[in-house]
Image (cartoon, grey):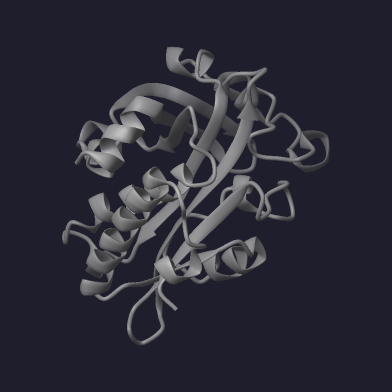
Amino acid sequence: MRLPDQLLPRTTMREQELMKIIETLDAEAYAHGLQITLNTDFDELKRINKGLDKLPLTPNFDPDKADVNPTNGFWMKGVDFGGEVVFTQAARYYNCRNSTLALLHQSLKAFYEDPKAHAEDGEECVCEAPATHYISGHVCYHGELWLKKCYRGRGLTTTLPKLLMALVMLPWSPDYLFGMAQPGICTKGVGARYGYRNMQPHGMIWNVPSSGVLDEWVIWNNADDLEQAVMRN
């Protein structure tokens, strides 16, 4: 089953426009040898992630640590025509109407359903990027983007993030879509190729005693940026 076949028929003109974009992007990926499916079983993502040449699964998407489920998240799996997993990415919705991105991370609630139960002793997160202190409302996180090396350099680093952006617009129409990216991704322009219009350093300075400090940039689109990136490119 191809990804567009997994989605329910849409009735409004805007939903139908999004469906056409999703179909086009899925066809582009398929032409490069990727068959993509939409998934909400995060136990499967955790199991698959262990066998991939990528960083460990972030706790945002770990069902043993976070309250991530079909109502607030999904992930995408891409396999080659031999059935090998060659691509993943995931999205998660956060209700920040009475909070901010900075408070979400500094409380460790971005990562854990119960920080007292799952965070390490001494674990902390600081957000210095100014944008994290005003990003609020209906917010979606874009993570777990991984593509096998042999598929890179084919334009898929534009196609695949744009596909996720279109998909998050269907159920959530977020005020903001954001990701946390390594500095090199941003300074080399990769974040822009992903379709993000804005980025700032020190979006998340996350200190986990057992593994060290992760200092990442925040990349984001507001609702207007998202509209531009998906509907008008």
Describe residue 152's horizontal placement relative to residue 50 as left or right.
left
Picture quadrant of residue 26: bottom left
**Which is more toward the observer, 5 or 26?**
5
The residue located at (63%, 20%) in the rendering is 103
* Total marks placed: 0
Residue 63 position, x and y percent, is: 70, 55
The residue located at (37%, 52%) in the rendering is 16
Residue 126 position, x and y percent, is: 57, 20
> Is residue 127 shown to the viewer in this render?
yes
Picture quadrant of residue 3: bottom left
Q: Is residue 86 above or below residue 213?
A: below
Describe residue 74's horizontal placement relative to residue 120 as left or right.
left
**Which is more toward the observer, 49 or 34?**
34
> Is residue 183 shown to the viewer in this render?
no
The residue located at (24%, 50%) in the rendering is 158
**Which is more toward the observer, 127 or 74?**
74
Residue 153 position, x and y percent, is: 16, 59
Quarter of the image where the N terminus is located: bottom left
Furthest residue toward right: 117
Q: Is residue 139 above or below residue 171?
A: above
Residue 114 position, x and y percent, is: 79, 38
The residue located at (27%, 38%) in the rendering is 229
Q: Is residue 88 above or below residue 36?
A: above
Describe residue 120's horizontal placement relative to residue 161 as left or right.
right
Furthest residue toward left: 154
Quarter of the image where the C terminus is located: top left
